[in-house]
Image (cartoon, helix red, strand yellow):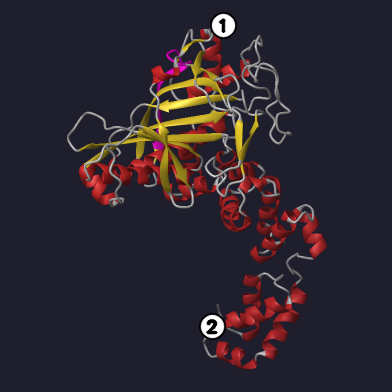
Amino acid sequence: MTVTTDLVSYEDALASYDPVMGLEVHVELGTKTKMFCGCSTELGAEPNSQTCPTCLGMPGALPAVNAIGVESAIKIGLALHCEIAEWCRFARKNYFYPDMPKNFQTSQYDEPIAFNGYLDVQLEDGEVFRVEIERAHMEEDTGKSLHVGGATGRIHGASHSLLDYNRAGIPLIEIVTKPIEGAGERAPEVAKAYVAELRELIKALGVSEARMEQGQMRCDVNLSLRPHGREKFGTRSETKNVNSLRSVERAARFEIQRHAAVLNSGGTIIQETRHFHEDTGSTTSGRVKEEAEDYRYFPEPDLVPVAPSREWVEELRAGLPEQPLARRNRLREEWGITAHDMQSILNAGAIDSIVATIAAGADAASARKWWMGELARTANESGVSLDALDITPEQVARVAALVNEGSLNDKLARQVIEGVLKGEGTPDEVVEKRGLKVVSDEGALTTAVEEAIAGNAAIADKIRGGKVAAVGALVGAVMKATRGQADAARVKELILEKLGVEG
């Protein structure tokens, strides 16, 4: 029996129950061809133009394993501190769905390529939480359904559906956690931090761009509640295909409140899949969840087992990049910033841009200042990521150099960045075209200062009388006269010299 109730408050839910989570993350690999055939994986092609008998499941078509896909799976497993299988097989996961042309998915069942690992994740306040990894296994993606004629884009209310099989067969790695216990009220935050850290790790490995907004990485949030003091897990729900970090956190939080409401009212949680709705932050029922035996798994007869040599595995291990968390801690020490500052940089997606800008010659403070200030603001207003802006780290480093050498002040530098973003050329070209160099000619500055003093006699008298703070008005007059192209500090010095006042 299921009783429909309103949500209970989050605090009340945690007062009675412990949340237990399981996170399943699908990562679409960045290979040039599909997992079991030679079809292209490039995005944006005409529907059904990147298909062949193999990925369409035609009778007699035989698959072949993508070697880069296997290599990527091993890299991911090693980076997650997993054991790598010496021998493993693919399996057929049998179920019908219109966007899966073979009526089975080629996956791995009881013999994954990587298993028994962990990932340490850092929460907003610096606490590190270890998430245990059950397995990481290889499989293929399904096609894509487009439901036409309805108001929501979902099948309910649609007049008909279109199927695009270009995505069918694209390689996936599914990473499954062990039950995540002990997070308590921070469970939603842990879920978000885990997916964020996993995304950084995947990007560092270079096996996928892991763009959640493009479906290259998506998370299924499994959640159950158990009363305090009880060891047995409760019945779980699985919120499918959550595709943003914020939504992972919101989905976990909502399900905690929903489960608690159902249990408090005497209802029973149904093991089912659920859909997350971005607009409301809520979930709705999908379908009753199958158990493993319902998929009738059996070994894939058309593929040979995968048996990576230990030499190959160790070679891949030796080539792994620095772990993202370790890298952030190292950079934080090098840059002399707080954990909160580094978290803000991570949230903005600015770490790699800042590192590249420093490598191009900028000091760390200047690189952070421009990426986290003017450029972050521009990206936010434009609704794009920082790395999508039409400016390179080398160009940002050049702007910083022009400021440091005194050719630009911050106001002029912002105009230069604006010009670069608009496609007006390099920073130097924008400076030249817009005439943005700082006025450094002492004669020109002196003339501007004298004119400002003569035009503001009352303010000049106040300054002579000891009200030095009033100098700002005269500085502003000079900056206006020079179109913001004077060095404000030098202007202030000249004004006080002219008025015979010590600064």
Q: Quadrant of residue 262?
A: top left
Point out residue 451 in the picture as x, y percentages from the top left corner: 72, 86
Classify residue 140 as left or right of residue 295.
right
Q: What residue type is disc 2 on?
A: Val
From this viewpoint, which residue is outermost toward the left?
Answer: 229
Classify residue 290 as left or right of residue 399.
left
Mark nearer the N terminus (1 vs 2): 1
| Mark 2 lies on residue | 468
Quadrant holding the N terminus? top left
Q: Nearer the viewer, residue 289 or 192?
A: 289
What is the span of residues highlighted in magenta in the rendered image? 109-121
Q: Could you say whether the residue bearing mark 2 is in a helix, strand or loop?
A: helix
Classify residue 19 as left or right of residue 409.
left
Q: Nearer the viewer, residue 419 or 472?
A: 419
Tell how many labels: 2
From this viewpoint, which residue is outermost toward the right?
Answer: 433
Classify residue 307 as left or right of residue 165.
left
Q: Quadrant of residue 27?
A: top right
Q: Quadrant of residue 149?
A: top right
Q: Nearer the viewer, residue 330 or 253?
A: 253
Q: Is residue 119 magenta?
A: yes
Point out residue 467 in the picture as x, y percentages from the top left corner: 52, 86
Q: What residue type is disc 1 on?
A: Val
Point out residue 37 in the picture as x, y percentages from the top left corner: 67, 17
Residue 304: mark: 1
Is disc 1 surrounded by few (<14), some (14 to 19) or many (20+) residues within 10 Å? few
Q: CA distance from mark 1 to mark 2?
A: 84 Å
